[in-house]
Amino acid sequence: MRVTRAVYPGSFDPPTNGHLDVIERAARCFGEVIVAVVVNPQKRSPMFSLEEREAMLRSSVAAIPNVRVEHFRGLLADYVKAESADVIVKGLRVVSDFESEMSAAMMNRSLSDVDTLFLMSDQRYSFVSSSLVKEVFFLGGEVAALVPEPVLRMMTEKRTTLQRR
Ligand code: PNS
């Protein structure tokens, strides 16, 4: 019997504990979870390279056997079809996330006939986003409780590199 394959897409610039929480929940629900890093995020150019984002994720999910980290270009709907995935998984932190996610889900379904299933992240992470984590960290704030340990290490390296410039 074929296992249910889910794709969890995102920019992961950088991955947070909220992302990891959704990945862990998805890994319990589905046979296989592909964490799919978008090569070129729509919002703005990423602070972390594709290689850095993938490396941070791989280290963070190393202990979860049915999760693998890949990347994709172009339409998510095309990637999901190419991977023969059954569902897209997205995390919801707060109700307002649902507004944009609902139209994305319907667009992806109209493009590839694949459904999006939503998992509520733990309420501890309801205020955690990659952009806020970056802003706080690079202005000297404490984010150790908000990101996986390998991410904190990579962020610290990045801050040191940027400060040397
Ligand atoms: O972590 P993010 O930035 O919220 O992730 C957004 C992502 C990568 C899921 C979304 O931008 C996406 O699916 N990009 C691929 C291009 C695409 O398919 N666009 C139409 C989406 S309905």
Image (spheres, rainbow, N blue to C red):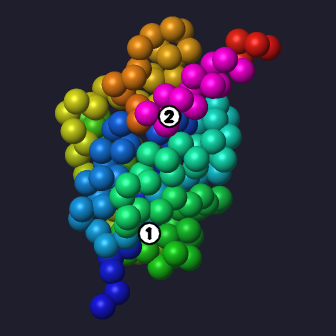
The amino acid type found where label 1 is placed reads Ser
The amino acid type found where label 2 is placed reads Val
How far from the left and from the top, in percent, is residue 59? 49, 47
Residue 138 lies, with reference to residue 5, above or below; the image says above
User: Most extreme residue toward the front, as rendered?
Assistant: 63
Give the SS element for disc 2. Answer: helix
Residue 15 lies, with reference to residue 6, above or below; the image says above
In the rendered picture of this protein, how many numbered marks are placed on residues?
2
Residue, x 65% and y 51% (percent of image)? Answer: 39
Local crowd size for mark 2, using a 10 Å CA cut-off: few (<14), some (14–19), many (≥20)? many
Location of residue 126 (image quadrant): top left
How far from the left and from the top, in percent, is residue 161? 72, 21
- The verdict on label 1 being within 8 Å of ligand 1 is no
How far from the left and from the top, in percent, is residue 16? 41, 36
Which residue is at the front of the view, 96 or 52? 52
Location of residue 60 (image quadrant): top left
| Quadrant for the C terminus in the image | top right
User: Most extreme residue toward the left, as rendered?
Assistant: 123
Badge 1 is on which residue? 110
User: Most extreme residue toward the bottom, as rendered?
Assistant: 1
Magenta run includes residue 14? no
> Can residue 108 be seen?
no
Are the residues at dot 2 and dot 1 in contact (C-beta closer than 8 Å)? no
Badge 2 is on which residue? 151
Residue, x 42% and y 51% (percent of image)? Answer: 61
Q: Which mark is residue 26?
A: none
Give the SS element for disc 1. Answer: helix
Range covered by the magenta-colored residues: 149-161
> Can residue 123 be seen?
yes
Residue, x 51% and y 51% (percent of image)? Answer: 58
